[in-house]
Image: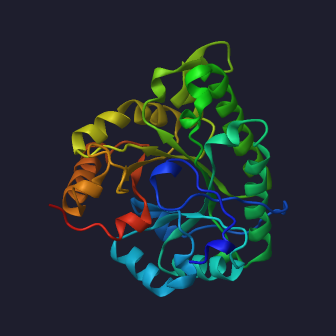
Amino acid sequence: MNSNKRNFFRPGRWAKAVILGCFLAGQALAPSGPYGTAEAAERPVVGTWMWNPYVIGEDPEGTLQALSERGVNLVYLCIDRDYPQAYYSRFIREAGALGIEVQALGGAPNWVLPEHNGKLYDFIYWVTGYNSQVAPEERFAGIHLDVEPYVLPEWSSDSDRIIGLWMDTVSGFAQEVRSTGALKVGIDMPVWLEHFSVRDGYGGRTTLSDWLIRRVDEVTLMAYRTSAKDVADSVRTELDEADRAGVPVIIGVDTADTGQLQESYYYHGTTRMNGDLARVAETYGSRPSYRGYSVHEWDSWIRLGPGS
């Protein structure tokens, strides 16, 4: 990869992963036509975050083969506005033929701050502009936002303000994406937001997790634990809330080298991870909101061995 051509911004868990970020910009143009595939929608989700978009140009065939071998049918693909659009078009088209849905991925902790909030809308406008210029089978199926403002220094000193800005950001994101056409609205969310109480907008109060879930079409929970019980326990409240809201939930686990043995399967391998994910599916497979799982992140997942 040639670092001098990168113009992208790596969101959430940015300090612990491979790519530094995704910066996105463009102009707003409305998309049209169908998104994704019926096959991908019917099967349980097996997803992944692809923070390194360059693999789709450097080794598209190998990447698609590896995705298929792992049963992946949903990719959150980070956007580099300077990367040739032809690479995105080809990848989305060929992935779709294999039953793999591709959503545009972006975000950063500071996007919730007023002085950086414009980057969110640049991201949205880039995606909708791209979608308007390509064939239906080459369009992104949705926009997936990863903002994790709890890593900002301001969180420890003024969390109430940052939470309010976070809520405003997600609300604005959802409204803007829905105004542009048939794009799914998705977000990443940690699994401890039920401990924060916020106004529900109707004169009462609810949890921050419930408030966020009700604003979007799809939520991916970052249940970064390394046992089936811990993963299942960590998402129980959010699944209850999503069941009531009618919002689908995907459960995410981590494989990155974070230094946290209890949070990443990097230290335990695919055999344990796959077994744990199967047990979580057994626990929650009958729940209305449960849709499947997603593995963070692609670059580390493909290098992960069976385990010690």
Instruction: Indicate the position of residue 73 as horizontal and vertical percent values.
Output: 45, 67
Q: Seen in the image, is 295 located left or right of residue 78?
A: left
Q: Position of residue 194 (x, y in %)?
A: 46, 25
Q: Position of residue 107 (x, y in %)?
A: 63, 50
Q: Which residue occupies the foreground of this view, 120 or 139?
A: 120
Quarter of the view holding residue 299? bottom left
- Identified at 62% across, 28% down, the residue is 154
Left or right: 233 as drawn, with respect to 291: left
The image quadrant where one finds the C terminus is bottom left
Q: Quadrant of residue 260?
A: top left
**Residue at horizontal 69%, vertical 75%?**
136
Residue positioned most to the front: 4
Give the answer, above or below, for where 171 lies relative to 276. above
Q: Please state which of residues 53 and 199 is positioned toward the viewer in this rendering.
A: 53
Q: Which is more toward the observer, 253 or 202?
A: 253
* 305 with respect to 149 (left or right): left
Percent from the top left, x then y, of residue 203?
Answer: 67, 12
User: From what the image shows, is residue 119 above or below residue 212?
Assistant: below
Q: Quadrant of the N terminus?
A: bottom right
* Residue 45, placed above or below residue 258: below
Q: Residue furthest top?
A: 203
